[in-house]
Amino acid sequence: MTLAARVIPCLDVAAGRVVKGVNFENLRDMGDPVELARHYAAQGADEITFLDVTATVDGRATTYDVVQRTAEQVFVPLTVGGGIRSVEDVARLQGVGADKIGVNSAAIARPALIDEIADRFGAQVIVLSLDIKRSGNTDSGFVVTTHGGRTETTLDAVEWAREAIERGAGELLVNSIDADGTRDGFDLELVRLMREISSVPVIASGGAGKAADFPPAIAAGADAVLAASVFHSGLLTVGDVKQALREAGAIVR
């Protein structure tokens, strides 16, 4: 059975406000997360992803009240990431309405976190959030970063994704730091690499600038496409993206 391609607006949140920058820097205020989430759900978003982009950097937990207010008004699946360090954090987020949980920096620091979440809640709850840069220091040519793209690790992105899937990650959110916010299109080479090794759904993120950028990401192997600035700026609607995907022959909801 062919699954429908999903279109996922992403809310990068800092201090309770949606922000957006280029290559994860120079963040600008883009609005209220609850209002934006409601707006995108009305447009036909398949899911909403909520990333607290400064939680790990600031050494604090995700803003639970914002997640709860969003979940109370938006009735599509909500993925939440940022500052999640334990199964207790996952339980608390589920308690305020999160459907899936994104893990990144804490899982890199302690990979057993993925096993623990999968064992308690099931693999379908875990989204491995990968902030990836091109690098000449790894076999794949891609390296994983942490702390919102600020800290480069020595982990080969492909090897880490493979290990995380084996540990129980149920989905890969593949974000290109190099493409992030540039509006030059998705990193299709990165999407293809992840598709080759992944037995779980792949979400392509980073670089969308126009409706025509989305179908190539699905063609490269992504199961879903995620974007932020093109939606927040009003340049595109969720409907525009779904129409472009339909015209390219993709199945959408």
Image (cartoon, rainbow, N blue to C red):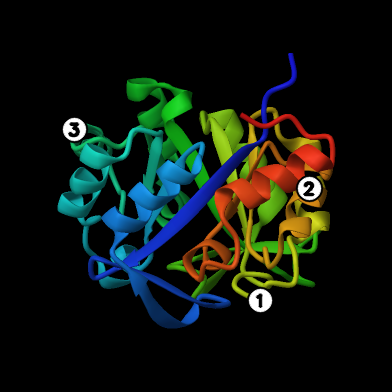
Quarter of the image with the N terminus in it: top right
> The residue under label 3 is which amino acid type?
Gly
Query: Is disc 1 surrounded by few (<14), some (14 to 19) or many (20+) residues within 10 Å?
Result: some
- Say which residue appears at 35% left-offset and 23% top-offset: 121
Q: Position of residue 88 (x, y in %)?
A: 21, 37
Q: Secondary structure at mark 1?
A: loop
Q: What residue is shown with label 1? A: 182
Q: Estimate the x, y position of residue 104 in percent, counting from the top left.
A: 46, 53
Compared to residue 232, the image places residue 190 above or below, namely above
Name the foreground residue: 247 vs 68.
247
Q: Which mark is residue 95?
A: 3
The amino acid type found where label 1 is placed reads Thr
Q: Describe the element under mark 3 as helix, strand or loop.
A: helix
Closer to the chain start, of discs 2 and 3, is: 3
Could you say which is closer to the camera, residue 10 or residue 231? 231
Residue 143 versus residue 4: which sits nearer the camera?
4
Q: Is residue 119 above or below residue 68?
A: above
Q: Is 45 displayed left or right of 239 in the figure? A: left
Q: Nearer the N terminus, badge 1 or badge 3?
A: 3
Residue that lies at the very extreme toward the bottom in this rendered image: 26
Q: On the picture, is 173 further left or further right than 61?
A: right
Three-letter code, disc 2: Pro
* Residue at 68% over, 68% down: 209
Q: Nearer the viewer, mark 1 or mark 3?
A: 1
Label 2 or label 1, whichever lies nearer to me, is 2
Name the residue at 60% across, 46% down: 239
- Name the residue that disc number 2 marks: 215
Do the residues bearing badges 2 and 1 touch, measured as CB atoms within 8 Å?
no
Q: CA gap, disc 1 to disc 3?
A: 36 Å
User: Where residue 200 appears, x then y in whole percent?
Assistant: 64, 29
